[in-house]
């Protein structure tokens, strides 16, 4: 019997909420994206909730619109949403890379889940959480048994067990505001759903865009959003660094708006349709037209003028990324696997060439593509604004073991399912 259910991925971004509804097949472990939606919201800035009622309304609208889109394409009416996975980001989120150890004193005994759990707890104990921060997500990224790297050591023999743990923490106020907005949105929408889970958005993106080869070679993911730029640095297949820069492509739009004295919407269209990281000399004298501030008159300008506005801003972004790479000691290992660009800001013309010139390495755009574990309409995969929400859905299929499961409850409290499982485990032990 086919076992399918729905999973919703919600990306709380900069000035908008993006949602993807996926049908997940438990047997093939494949996610099929059935519906998507994005709704603008001025009350959400850099992933932080400014006004809960309006933010909740936006989230509800994005979820309902995506679900309605899914219902048109597939018979999913009345189907329970198994999980709503919320992808979170923000410049105040902090990254931690830690190491833990445990020992298997019985050489005749296989390494068990309890040994791994002890090593993970040892690593987690070392997280220096600021007083006003919560743990958002934890990922066991590397296991070493008696000096040898292993994919997952449960069932193997060995004595010395080491684990690397990547974790992100989020300001407590942002965490609580996010959860409250989500709870209100789900209540207002009257959805049948199981639970909400919170993940770090840039990790969700890297899971569906980066190839295993790129991660193993070492690479850098750059997600250029509206008001934040996310960096995820992989070295030898595991996350070494993860940072956010409080800057983004929205500032380019604002600079265009001020320079030409036009509406914000017209400025955005100019950036997307005519903007470029740099303009070749043979195009600088070419012209294009745009709508003036009155919304009626058309004006014409040369590409050279728009280049004078955009190029300095792109140069600042490139320098900010270079500064983080230097100060956080990323090293130059990512040059091997190259840089992968995603996010709305990466749609700017010539952005790949600008990064290639700045960092002297291979650079590509991180478009989604169909795979044995993910499928979606071509136009949806080509729209990078949905990548994070789709990544959240696709990441649902993680093993429930602590080896690969990335969706750790962000509050530090046990989820209801964990409490029930713990209860039956204790009953079993009694008998």
Image: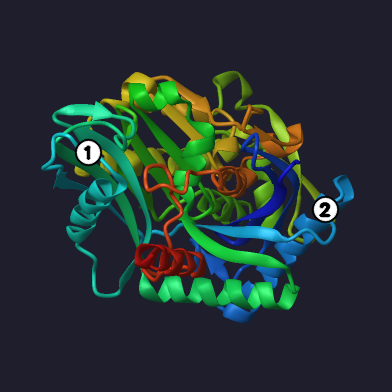
Label disc, if present, on residue 84 of the rendered structure: none
Residue 295 location, quadrant: bottom right
Q: Secondary structure at mark 1?
A: helix
Q: Residue at x 18, y 54 (%)?
A: 122
Q: Residue at x 40, y 76 (%)?
A: 173
Is 46 rendered above or below residue 248?
Answer: below
- Quadrant assignment for the N terminus: top right
Residue nearer the viewer, 78 or 223: 78
Left or right of 261? Residue 328 is left
Alpha-carbon span between mark 1 and mark 2: 49 Å
- Quadrant assignment for the C terminus: bottom left
Left or right of 390? Residue 139 is left
Residue nearer the viewer, 402 or 390: 402
Residue located beneath label 2 in the image = 76
Residue nearer the viewer, 166 or 62: 166
Is 82 rendered above or below residue 161?
Answer: below
Task: Of the two numbered discs 1 and 2 on the same chain, state the one appearing first in sequence.
Answer: 2
Residue 300 location, quadrant: top right
Label disc, if present, on residue 326 of the rendered structure: 1
Residue 209 coordinates in the image, percent (x, y) = 53, 33
Q: Residue at x 68, y 77 (%)?
A: 187
Residue 59 coordinates in the image, percent (x, y) = 66, 67
Residue 180 coordinates in the image, percent (x, y) = 54, 77
Is 48 rendered above or below residue 405?
Answer: below
Left or right of 185? Residue 317 is left
Mark in front: 1 vs 2: 2
Badge 1: residue crowd in 10 Å (few <14, some 14–19, many ≥20): few
Q: How many marks?
A: 2
């Amino acid at each position: 019997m086919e076992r399918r259910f729905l999973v919703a991925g919600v990306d709380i971004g900069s000035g908008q909420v993006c949602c993807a509804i996926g049908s997940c097949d438990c047997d093939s472990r494949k996610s099929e994206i059935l519906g998507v939606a994005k709704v603008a919201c001025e009350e959400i800035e850099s992933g932080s909730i400014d006004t809960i009622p309006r933010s909740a309304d936006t989230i509800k609208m994005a979820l309902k619109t995506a679900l309605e889109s899914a219902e048109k394409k597939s018979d999913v009416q009345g189907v329970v949403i198994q999980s709503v996975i919320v992808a979170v980001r923000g410049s105040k989120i902090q990254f931690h890379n830690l190491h833990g150890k445990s020992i298997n004193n019985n050489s005749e005994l296989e390494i068990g889940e309890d040994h791994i759990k002890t090593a993970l707890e040892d690593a987690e104990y070392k997280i220096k959480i600021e007083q006003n921060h919560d743990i958002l997500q934890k990922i066991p990224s590397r296991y070493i048994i008696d000096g040898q790297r292993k994919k997952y050591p449960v069932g193997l023999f060995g004595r010395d067990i080491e684990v690397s743990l990547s974790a992100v923490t989020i300001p407590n106020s942002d965490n609580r505001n996010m959860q409250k907005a989500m709870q209100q949105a789900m209540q207002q929408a009257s959805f049948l759903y199981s639970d909400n889970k919170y993940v770090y958005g840039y990790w969700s993106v890297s899971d569906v865009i980066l190839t295993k080869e790129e991660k193993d070679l070492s690479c850098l993911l750059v997600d250029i959003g509206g008001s934040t730029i996310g960096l995820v640095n992989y070295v030898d297949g595991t996350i070494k660094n993860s940072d956010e820069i409080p800057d983004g492509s929205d500032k380019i739009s604002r600079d265009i708006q001020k320079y030409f004295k036009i509406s914000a919407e017209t400025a955005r269209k100019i950036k997307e349709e005519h903007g470029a990281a740099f303009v070749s000399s043979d195009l600088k004298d070419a012209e294009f037209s745009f709508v003036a501030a009155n919304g009626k008159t058309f004006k014409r300008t040369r590409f050279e003028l728009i280049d004078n506005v955009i190029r300095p801003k792109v140069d600042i972004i490139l320098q900010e990324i270079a500064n983080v790479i230097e100060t956080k000691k990323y090293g130059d290992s990512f040059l091997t696997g190259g840089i992968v660009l995603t996010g709305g800001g990466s749609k700017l013309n010539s952005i790949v060439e600008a990064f290639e010139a700045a960092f002297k390495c291979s650079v590509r755009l991180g478009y989604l593509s169909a795979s044995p574990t993910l499928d979606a309409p071509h136009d949806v995969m080509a729209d990078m604004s949905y990548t994070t929400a789709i990544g959240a859905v696709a990441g649902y299929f993680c093993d429930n073991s602590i080896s690969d499961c990335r969706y750790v409850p962000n509050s530090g409290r046990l989820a209801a399912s964990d409490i029930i499982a713990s209860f039956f485990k204790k009953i079993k032990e009694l008998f």
